Amino acid sequence: MVSLSPSSPLIWILAGEASGDVLGARLIQALRALDPHIRFAGVGGVRMEAEGFESLFPMRELAVMGLVEILPRVRQLSRRLNQAVDDIAAHRPDLVITIDSPGFALCLLRRIAGMGILRVHYVAPQVWAWRQKRVRKFPGLWDELLCLLPFEEAFFGRHGLKTRFVGHPVLQSGARDGDAGRFRATHGLADAARILVLMPGSRRSEVPRLLPVFGQMLALLKTRMPDVVPVVPVSPVVAATVEQAVRNWPVRPVIVTDVQDKHDAFAAAGAALTKSGTSTLELALAGVPMAVTYRVNPLTAFMARRLIRVPHVAMVNLLAGREIVPELLQENCAPEVLAREVQKLFENPTVAQAQKAAFATVLHGLEGPGGALPADAAARAVMDLLAARKA
């Protein structure tokens, strides 16, 4: 926490995973640009810590996903929830911001509802995708919801929830600004090497499900496309897990943890396989042809299929309203299926060009109001709430 005058505003922030850590860091920068005396406390990761933020406990302890995967850690998560609530009660911040991670974040917001503290949730829970009736539980949880997708403002507004669309932060991620030549030079890769980006996720609970399949796929590709070099961009939170998992791969991968290096890899890449989520938007911004693949515990998948109410899981497909990138999920997340799709992306220019043309339309719809950068729009929303409370 920044040591400034006790009279300066104190904002308590919760980020529960790598993507939220990035959003939190940008939001801290944008808030300081509006008021350099703001103090911060809460839970965050390395990106927020680089802004001088001191995390109450390691953010990585919250980075878990899946109905089955979370069960062994319920007791630990409960302890951390109690710790966060106690810290908020002790410090009495002017405003609490929870970023994504709805399982933990919404529990926290509910627990502090009676404290009279302003509450903002940043990144809308995707209830429009499955179990839409859950939206009925949200009134009273926050004073304002900051959403990233243009259709969310109307969806939550219909349910009487104060919501503001601030634009999608992928647009200021720098994903389109990579340098292909620098990436090849940094890692000693020949100009003829075909770069394949593999994005297994940012959570320790999900990475082990995709990496073995990627390794088996590479064994098939090694005979068909021997010049393919796999690149695995991961967050520092899961880097050690990834390094251990890829030791026996048939092709030595380049493991990337630096953000600029990741963007350089995007610029050099001819194709990508990625989990669903924001990574699809990052790759779209960089113009990388891709296929989306994912595998979870079979019980989790069974339950999800009964609950999901949207036609696509890949964010680029959902925003486009049609399948512009293949979705290879569960039983289709198989070595032979993935190998065929990767070969098609590299060797069929028509497929790659069609994807890139569709990406441009999708990304245009993610621009924030008035052309403001998403973090700036989010910071302004926070400052407006603080000003309204003082008025």
Image (spheres, rainbow, N blue to C red):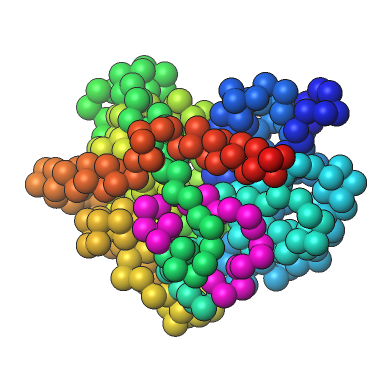
Residue sitting farthest toward the front: 391
Q: Nearer the viewer, residue 74 or 295?
A: 74
Q: Nearer the viewer, residue 105 or 305?
A: 105
Residue sitting farthest toward the left: 350
Q: Vertically, is 134 above or below 185?
A: below
Q: Tell me the residue at 56%/36% (across/down).
A: 379
Count of labels in the image: 0
Q: Vertically, is 330 above or below 204?
A: below
Q: Tell me the residue at 61%/30% (across/down).
A: 31
Q: Which of the 4 image quarters holds residue 295? A: bottom left
Classify the position of the N terminus by image quarter.
top right
Q: Is residue 209 visible?
A: yes
Q: Nearer the viewer, residue 146 or 384?
A: 384
Residue sitting farthest toward the right: 90
Q: Is residue 140 magenta?
A: yes
- Please provide the residue range marked out in magenta: 135-154
Q: Residue 51 placed where, x, y %?
A: 66, 26
Is residue 29 left or right of 10 when viewed as pictured?
left
Q: Tell me the residue at 66%/62% (across/down).
A: 141
Classify the position of the C terminus by image quarter.
top right
Is residue 90 left or right of 107 when viewed as pictured?
right
Q: Tell me the residue at 40%/61% (across/down).
A: 154
Q: Is residue 384 magenta?
A: no
Q: Is residue 215 visible?
A: no
Is residue 280 left or right of 96 when viewed as pictured?
left
Q: Residue 344 placed where, x, y %?
A: 18, 51
Q: Residue 211 placed where, x, y %?
A: 48, 53
Is residue 118 left or right of 253 when viewed as pictured?
right
Q: Vertically, is 65 above or below 177?
A: below
Q: Nearer the viewer, residue 88 or 142?
A: 142
Q: Which of the 4 image quarters holds residue 54? A: top right
